Image: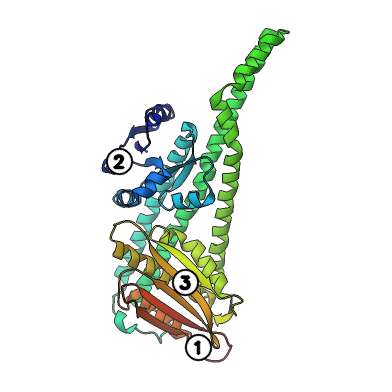
Amino acid sequence: MDVIGLWLAGNTTADLARRLAAQGVAAHQIAGPADLSGDLDGIVAPAGMLEAHAQAVRAFREGRAPLPVPVVAVLERDADEAAVTRALGVADEIIRQPVCAIELAARLRLLSRLRQGLVAARRQEALRHDAKARARAAKTDFASGGNVAGTGLGAGQDAALMESLGRLTLGVAQEIASPVQYVGGNLEFMANTFARMVESLDGLSVAALRLGQDEAGLAAALAELLDDEELRFLLEETPAAIRESREGLDRVAALLQSLGNFARQDTVTPRTVDVAAVLEDVLTLSRGVWKYEADVATDIEPDLPAVVFPPADLGRALLVLLVRAARAIREKLGGKGGKGRIDVLMRRAGEAVEVVVRDDGARCPIDRSLALVRAMMGRRRAGFEALAGTDGGATVVLTLPRDHGPAALGA
């Protein structure tokens, strides 16, 4: 990481820049959105300032392809969970006031390494996707849904699935990267704290040996140690660093559990499936795909019955719909900032369960993503309906069978 822009008030910037320089991180002050230029490799700013200028921050991040540059939000020490959630909507990382240069430098270095790894992963995914696209001729009529009766997918539908899985892969990598950077940054912070503690205790021991029985001199040396503001700050922040690390590891564990559930599902065999549980896994895994584009709200009827459906097909269908909705919202916003909305509803519908995915993105016809989902539903004799919104967006309704009869089993 070469140059970090510090978007802070008063003399804080100059002092922090000096302390970051001592940690090997170059930084300079930026006065406003106009200073978010292409030569910056990251920015650090109060969460409120980032939220107030979200459009400029978003344009700055997206202008630095192939992945957004790191953004660190500075929060008050007593900021609540809602403030943290809002900050993470515009930033990759948070840090509490007062800013410790050692901790910030550690987090910035780790963010930079993770970004480099994600850039390489995205390049590899793009190469694989391009090779796949070249190997198949686009012969499917997207408007009619292509060959839904066959056992395979059309080329366009296959490309839609590959796009969704590719975005899922990158999204999961980014979602894992965020808690991992907490753990990595906090470990480096705690290592520095421990080293400083050892240094201070060594100094106190030397003073004790030198002063011998001079109790007043020893007391003065101890008082000097206790007055060390930097050491006191490091010790006070260590419990929070441990707590954040545990929370980060819990997030990674949840992601890996959802990924395992998603990967282990049998693709072809219909069986009873908890639709809400499948949705929970898909939302957990796909958060990195849609979190910068939309807020997702769910409305699930209590005690929803199980359906008969291949779990993997259901998970992939929901994933494709979420990716398509996020893309439609991104197209509608056109880099203007803000977020769209995706609603997922689940409810009983006679002897079936309806799954409704609604977005407020750009209006679109039956594209290859919707054609893919229609084909997946058609193979399982499940219902599919796509409706265009009056002011843009789309509503997709899936009707999933609950019984074990021949229609449900695709006979």
Going by the numbered disc 2, the residue's amino acid type is Gly
Residue at (30% x, 51% y) in the render: 59
Mark 1 or mark 3: which comes first in sequence? Answer: 3
Residue 255 lies in what quarter of the image? bottom right
* CA distance for labels 3 and 2: 38 Å
Residue 146 lies in what quarter of the image? bottom left
Q: Residues within 10 Å of mark 3 (few under 14, many from 20)?
A: many
In this picture, residue 55 sits left or right of residue 210: left
* Residue tagged 1: 410
Residue at (58% x, 28% y) in the render: 232
Residue 87 is situated, as x and y percent measured from the top left of the image, at: 44, 49
* CA distance for labels 2 and 1: 60 Å
* Residue tagged 2: 32
Quadrant placement of the N terminus: top left
Q: Is residue 75 above or below residue 139?
A: above
Q: Is residue 308 above or below residue 177?
A: below
Residue at (39% x, 41% y) in the render: 45
* Residue tagged 3: 344
Nearest to the observer: residue 22 or residue 333: 333
**Residues under numbered marks 1 and 3 in contact, where contact means CB atoms less than 8 Å apart:** no
Going by the numbered disc 3, the residue's amino acid type is Val
Q: Give the number of the mark in front: 2 or 1.
A: 2
Q: Residues within 10 Å of mark 1 (few under 14, many from 20)?
A: some
Residue 122 is situated, as x and y percent measured from the top left of the image, at: 37, 56
Q: Is residue 190 above or below residue 347?
A: above
**Residues under numbered marks 2 and 1 in contact, where contact means CB atoms less than 8 Å apart:** no
Residue at (56% x, 39% y) in the render: 187
Q: How crowded is mark 2: few (under 14 residues within 10 Å), some or many (20 or more)?
A: few
Nearest to the observer: residue 289 or residue 154: 289
Q: In this view, does 362 lie above or below 8?
A: below
